[in-house]
């Protein structure tokens, strides 16, 4: 069995049909069907259950898919590593970021492009669980997110480098006029305030941290809305529905809206941001240099 056959198998597993897989691979269906039959004969197991024209992985096929993906990725990374021995820093660097960390990327990317103009970027935005999946599947090399990363995988799967501490601030509707009389607020003053919380079904750590801080001051926060999107939370604040607590750097993305921002002066509320990548896997030269730039900027 060779790497070409592994690619054939992975295409069939993805498309769940030989005809579609053949089209993706730019080849005729009969040769692809023959290759699948040869693989199954060599392994002595069925890789797919057939229901009409559709194909579904068997238990053996599921295990084989996992191993085949790892082998193909290892080969691709080896080829990249060998090529990079003779080449300079070039190619495409794929980075994923949570929305709350997007504002941290433009300046480092500009600096990096000034130094390495042959490198282009692909930037994707998603929540922490999606970033974890993208890192595992190599859709992205690096993730920029708050720490620790919440994902479906063990923490020791990833290498992590903290790059910034960011204080939390209270974001509130301009019409409340609280910031006219003072520049900061005590966390105890949030006791009777309607609050909007950044939370999804899976990503909960930020929400839990805010609740914990409030409880340390002897009250349960009044959460009137939970939402997975920073943009939606801000729109609800603008509408006067409530206030929210977010990292200060996030607010650079919303400079012209009808909102106010106040420091929280009696708690060490910090937002730790870091860069995350897959441990024990090859990192491209551009990724390694970008990590260095983030570390020392």
Image (cartoon, rainbow, N blue to C red):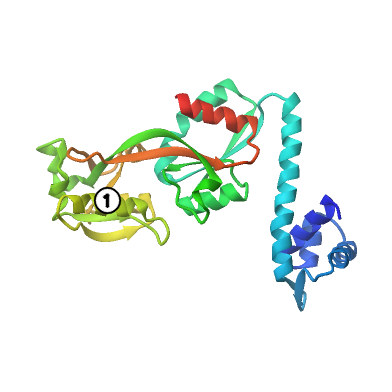
Q: Is residue 14 visible?
A: no
Asked if residue 293 is positioned above or below residue 28 in the image, the reply reads above
Q: Is residue 128 visible?
A: yes
The residue sitting at 77% across, 78% down in the picture is 52
Q: How many marks?
A: 1
Q: Residue 89 placed where, x, y %? A: 66, 26
Q: Nearer the viewer, residue 70 or 249?
A: 70
Task: Residue 271: name its quadrant.
Answer: top left
Q: Residue 25 placed where, x, y %? A: 80, 55
Quadrant where the image shows the N terminus: bottom right
Q: Give the residue at the far left of this rendering.
A: 181
Q: Residue 241 placed where, x, y %? A: 22, 56
Q: Give the residue at the far front of this rendering.
A: 156
Asked if residue 201 is positioned above or below residue 119 in the image, the reply reads below
Crowding near the residue tagged with mark 1, few <14, some 14–19, many ≥20 C-alpha atoms within 10 Å: some
The residue sitting at 74% across, 50% down in the picture is 71
Q: Give the residue at the far top of this rendering.
A: 115
Task: Residue 142: name its quadrant.
Answer: top right
The residue sitting at 80% across, 66% down in the picture is 19
Where disc 1 sits, the SS reads: helix
Residue 184 lies left or right of residue 244; in this view the side is left
Residue 4 lies left or right of residue 198; in this view the side is right
Q: Nearer the viewer, residue 179 or 191?
A: 191
Residue 51 lies left or right of residue 28; in this view the side is left
Residue ID for mark 1: 210
Asked if residue 163 is positioned above or below residue 177 in the image, the reply reads above
The residue sitting at 86% across, 66% down in the picture is 33
Quadrant where the image shows the C terminus: top left
Residue 98 lies left or right of residue 278; in this view the side is left
């Amino acid at each position: 069995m060779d790497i070409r056959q592994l690619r054939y198998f992975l295409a069939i597993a993805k498309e769940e049909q030989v005809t579609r897989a053949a089209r993706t691979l730019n080849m005729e269906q009969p040769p692809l069907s023959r290759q699948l039959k040869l693989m199954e004969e060599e392994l002595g197991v069925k890789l797919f259950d057939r229901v009409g024209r559709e194909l579904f992985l068997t238990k053996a096929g599921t295990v084989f898919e996992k191993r085949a993906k790892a082998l193909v990725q290892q080969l691709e990374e080896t080829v990249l590593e060998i090529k990079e021995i003779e080449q300079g820093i070039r190619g495409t660097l794929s980075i994923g970021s949570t929305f709350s960390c997007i504002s941290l990327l433009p300046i480092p990317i500009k600096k990096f492009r000034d130094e390495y103009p042959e490198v282009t970027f692909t930037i994707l935005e998603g929540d922490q669980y999606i970033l974890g999946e993208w890192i595992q599947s190599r859709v992205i090399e690096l993730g920029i997110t708050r720490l620790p990363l919440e994902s479906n995988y063990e923490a020791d799967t990833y290498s992590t480098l903290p790059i910034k501490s960011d204080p939390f601030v209270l974001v509130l509707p301009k019409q409340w006029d609280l910031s006219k009389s003072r520049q900061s607020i005590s966390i105890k003053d949030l006791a009777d305030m309607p609050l909007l919380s950044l939370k999804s079904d899976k990503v909960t750590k930020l929400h839990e941290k805010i609740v914990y801080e409030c409880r340390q001051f002897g009250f349960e926060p009044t959460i009137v809305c939970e939402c997975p999107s920073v943009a939606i939370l801000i729109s609800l604040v603008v509408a006067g529905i409530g206030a929210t607590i977010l990292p200060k750097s996030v607010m650079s993305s919303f400079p012209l809206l009808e909102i106010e921002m106040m420091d929280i002066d009696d708690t060490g509320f910090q937002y730790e941001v870091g860069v995350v990548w897959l441990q024990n896997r090859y990192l491209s030269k551009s990724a390694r240099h970008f990590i260095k730039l983030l570390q020392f900027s």
